[in-house]
Amino acid sequence: MIEFDLAADGLRALNRQLQGLGEQSNETEWRVLHPSGEHALAVGLTRPLKVVVEGHAGFYCGGMNSQAEIEIRGHAGPGVAENMMSGIVRVTGNASQSAGASGHGGVLVIEGDASSRCGISMKGIDIVVGGSVGHMSAFMAQAGNLVVCGDAGANLGDSIYEARLFVRGKVESLGADCIEKEMREEHLAALTELLQRAGMDADPGQFRRYGSARKLYNFNVDHADAY
Amino acid sequence: MSVDPRNLRASSSFPPEVIAEIQRAADQGVYDIRGLGAKRRVPGFDDLILLGASVSRYPLEGYRERCDTNVVLGARHAKKPIELKIPITIAGMSFGSLGANAKEALGLAASAMGTSTTTGDGGMTPEERQSSKTLVYQLLPSRYGMNPDDLRKADAVEVVVGQGAKPGGGGMLLGHKITERVAEMRDLPVGIDQRSACRHPDWTGPDDMEIKIREIREITDWQVPVYVKVGATRTHYDVTLAVKAGADVVVVDGMQGGTAATQDVFIEHVGIPTLPAVRLAVEALQEMDMHRKVQLIVSGGIRSGADVAKALALGADAVAIGSAAMMALGCNKPVYLEDYHKLGTEPGFCHHCHTGRCPVGVSTQDADLEVRLDPASGARHLKNYLTSMVLELQTLARACGKTHVLNLEPEDMAAMTIEAAAMAKVPLAGTDWIPGAKGW
C-alpha cells in the first residue's frame, strides 16, 4: 500500500496521481496520511483503486467517484461522495450535510450519523447509514435506495420521485408526497443485500419502507397546497 | 346598436388584458407558465446611442482598416482558456427544452463562427459535443445528466447559480416534453413534470461555492475555465462573491433573458434589466482590480450588433444570446400558421416553448415537428445572423475609432432617457448629467 503524506505533498499532487494512474498500473492501494479536514480529497477517480483516508475529510471527499473504493477513517464534511457514479465510499464516523448528493450509482456507507439532506437529489446511488439522518433527507430523491438504521429527521423524502427509503427507527415527519409503503418481498431482498454489502448488523424485518405517492408528478390544482 | 366609444373608458388598474388574466386564473387556478423572457418594456440598449468620431476623435475606414473581434476567456486560473473569434456566445439551453436538431444547429453555427455553445439542464448529448467545437458544460442545481466523464470533455464549466428569467427560481420542464430519451438523461420517469431545484444540493453560500469550484478544478486538473452564472438582481454583490470564490468568468443574465418554461409572474417581476446589470458588474470587477482579468459575459435580450457594441462599451468582454439564436433558427417565423393557431397564438407572439408543440421544430421533442428544422439549414441561418451581428458591431466600433471591439468604452455613448443615463451611468445626450453620480 502506497502512503501519501498530504501535509507534505498537498492536495494537487494527490489527486493528480490518483487520477493519472493507467489501467496497467499496480499502484492500486493508497493510504492518505494527515488529511486534516482537507476538501476535495480523492475526487474524480476513474479506476478501481482502494484509497484509505486516515483521518477526517472536508467537503466533497470522493466526489464524482467512479469505480474506486474510498474509506474515510474519521468524519466527513459536506457532500461526501457527491455525484458518485460507481464504486464504494465508506465513512467510519459521521457525515455532514448533503452526503451522497445527486449520486448516480455506487454505494455510500456511513457507519455513524449523517446530517441534513442526506441523499438529496439522489439519482441511483445506494446509501446505508448506520445511525440517524437529519432533516430533509432524500429531498427530491429520484432513484436508488436510502437505508437508515437509526431515526430520520423532519420532512423525509420531500418531493421524492422513485427512490426507495428504508428506516428502522422513528421518522419525525414525512415531506410532501412521501408516504409509507408496503414492504414486499423484493424490497426485503434488496434491503437485506444492501445491509450485507454495507456490513451492517441490522434485522431487515425491523425496517419500514417509504416512497412517492406520485401525486405531484403532474400539476393538479387540487394539490396546490402541497407545492 | 353600436356603443359610443366615448363611453368606453379603460381602467389603468384594470385594463382589458388584466381582466383577462384575472379570469384566466379564475378558470385554471394556477399561474400562467410560458417561455422566452420579459415582455414588458424595460430600459435597454436602445436607450443608449454611440458617439461616432468626428474632430476630437477620428474613425477607422469601414471595410478597410482592421477592427478585431477575438476574445480570450478564463485565463485567470485555467491552463486552457477559451479563445473565441467573436465576442458573441450561445447561451445555455437544454436538450429537452430544445430538440436535438436545434442543439446540433447551434453547435454547427457556433463552430463555423469560432464561438462557443453551452449545454443546459439535462446534460451533454454526444451530438452536441460532436457539433460544437467549443462547448461549455453547465453545473446546475438539478444535476440532471451530470457526470464526470462529460465534465472532462468540456472546454469550460459554468456553475449556474441563477438565470435572468427567474433569479431565485428553479426550472421546470412539463411532462409532455419528457420523452424516453429526456427521461433517461435526467433519471426520471417518462411524462412527469420535471422540477429543477433552485439551490445546489451540496453547497449554499459563497464560501461553499469557493470549495465547490476548487473540487471542479481538481476533477478537471485545473485545465478549463470555470464560469459562474448569476441572474441579475444584487449584481454588484453577486459578481464580487463569484470572483472571490475563484471564478475565471462571470456570466450576468438580465431579466430579458429567456427560459423554456417559467411562471409569467417570475419572468416579468423578478430581476433587473440587462442595462444596469452590466454597469454594476463592471463596477464590481473594477473595485477588485479584476476588470479584464476575470471576463464578464452579459446576456438577456441581446438582439443586434448595436446591443453587443453597447454592452462591450459598458465593459463586458462578450455577450451570450439565447432567444435571438432560437429566432435565427426559425422561432416565431410566419410558417406553419395552422400550428401557431392550434396553440392559440400567432407568429411574432408565440412563447409556447413550454408546450413542446413548437411549430418550427426548435423547442420540441416531437419527432414530426422536429424534422421541420434541418440542422444544416438552421446552422446556415444562425451563421448568417451572427455574421450580420459582427459586421454591425465592427461598423459601430470603427465609427468610434476602435481597432478592437473591446476598446469601446462608456465615453463612446450617451443616453436617450434619464432612466438609461442613471442605470448605465453615461450622461444624458446633450448634457453632462448622470443621475445618481457624485455631485448630482
Image: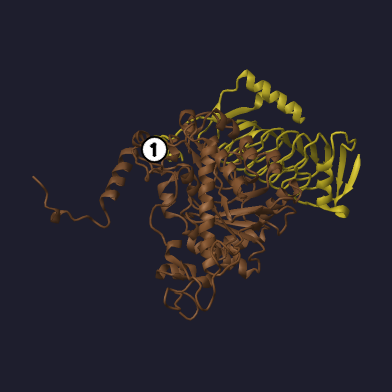
Chain colours: A yellow, B brown
Specify the quadrant that holds the C terminus of chain B. Answer: bottom left
Asked whether the viewer can see residue A217, the reply is no
In the rendered image, the residue lying farthest to the bottom is B439
* Dot 1 alpha-carbon crowd within 10 angstroms: few under 14, some 14 to 19, many 20 or more: some
- Relative to B303, does residue B260 appear above or below in the rendering? above
A197 left or right of B181 in image: right
Residue with the mark numbered 1? B335
- Relative to B399, does residue B227 appear above or below in the rendering? above
Residue under the point 75% across and 26% down: A196
In the image, what residue type sits under mark 1? Val
In the rendered image, the residue lying farthest to the top is A185
- Residue B275 horizontal/vertical position (percent): 48, 62
Callout 1: chain? B
- Relative to B368, does residue B83 appear above or below in the rendering? below
Specify the quadrant that holds the N terminus of chain B. Answer: top left
Q: B32 and B128: which one is in front?
A: B128
Q: A24 and B105: which one is in front?
A: B105
- Residue A199 horizontal/vertical position (percent): 77, 30
- Residue A89 horizontal/vertical position (percent): 76, 37
In the rendered image, the residue lying farthest to the front is B64
Q: Disc 1 on helix, strand or loop? A: loop
- Residue B289 horizontal/vertical position (percent): 66, 69
Asked whether the viewer can see residue B46, the reply is yes
How many numbered callouts?
1
